[in-house]
Image: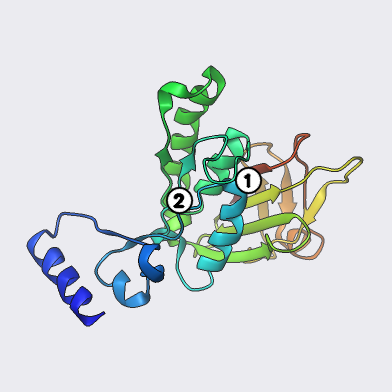
Amino acid sequence: MLALYRLQQRLTDEFPEVLLENCCSGGGRFDPGMLYYSSQIWCSDDTDAVQRLGIQEGTTMLYPLSCIGSHVSICPNHLVGRVTPFHTRGAAAMAGTFGYELDVTALSPDEARQIPAQIARYKALRPLVQSGDYYRIASAWEGGWDCYMVVGRDREQAAVFAFRVLDAPNQAPKRLRLQGLDLAGIYEETETGRRWRGDVLYRIGLPVSFDAGDFQGKVISMARV
């Protein structure tokens, strides 16, 4: 391991302009020591968006979102064969460095149209995602829901990442009790214009509904007004 650190040191000394990304292969070598040399990690070759919810949840127990490589990948997924909506894959990939690993010429016209909007959305969220405070709201391992959020240090901006793995009939909106916000502040959802008191979001929760179908995910941006 020390020899590997020495090799990484040589590479960073001789090529300081090159970004090194460490990989999960070979025994999960994105330990904190490796992050000294490479500020980005690839936490799993499993790129299925639903599987990634749990993988990224576990990774964020120790590592910040700013170093986690996360991508929108092909569908059906080449490992599990799962068919996941393109917008859900995008939402899952935004909790990290964000990117695409697929043949863009094989996408449907609807999927191709979503790419510019996803990139613009991530660029707008990037300072928040990579520098904000991370809060776990619900676990991907429990109950078929997943939710986490990132809040700016000044509590002016927040982004909520919410996912429903499996659909069911007659589901009421899920109330997500948010954290990290100014309890005395008023927050507005960027997409809908709905406004909420911070203490209501904390104690009662933000009602979130999804489109019909399995594997639905969305990102909700909020700003203090």
Where residue 169 appears, as percent x and y from the top left, is 90, 40
Mark 2 Cα-neighbour bin, 10 Å: few <14, some 14–19, many ≥20: many
Question: In the drawing, does residue 211 fall left or right of residue 147?
Answer: right
> Given the image, on which type of amino acid does mark 1 rest?
Ile
Mark 1: which secondary structure? strand
Colour logic: rainbow
Q: In this view of the protein, which residue sits in the foreground, 202 or 40?
A: 40
Do the residues under discs 1 and 2 have CB atoms within 8 angstroms?
no
The single residue placed furthest to the right in the displayed view is 170
Residue 159 in view here? no
Report, in whole angstroms, how far the alpha carbon at label 1 lies from the one at label 2.
19 Å
**Residue at (19% x, 69% y) in the render:** 8
Where residue 142 appears, as percent x and y from the top left, is 75, 63
Question: In the drawing, does residue 204 fall left or right of residue 159?
Answer: right
Where residue 198 appears, as percent x and y from the top left, is 71, 60
> Given the image, on which type of amino acid does mark 2 rest?
Ser
Question: In the drawing, does residue 56 fall left or right of residue 185?
Answer: left
Where residue 159 appears, as percent x and y from the top left, is 58, 52
Residue 119 image-quadrant placement = top left
Q: Is residue 48 above or below residue 141?
A: above
Q: What residue is disc 2 on?
A: 70
Mark 2: which secondary structure? loop
Label total for image? 2
The single residue placed furthest to the top in the displayed view is 109
Q: Is residue 106 above or below residue 4?
A: above
Q: What residue is disc 1 on?
A: 220
- Specify which label sits upstream in the sequence, 1 or 2: 2
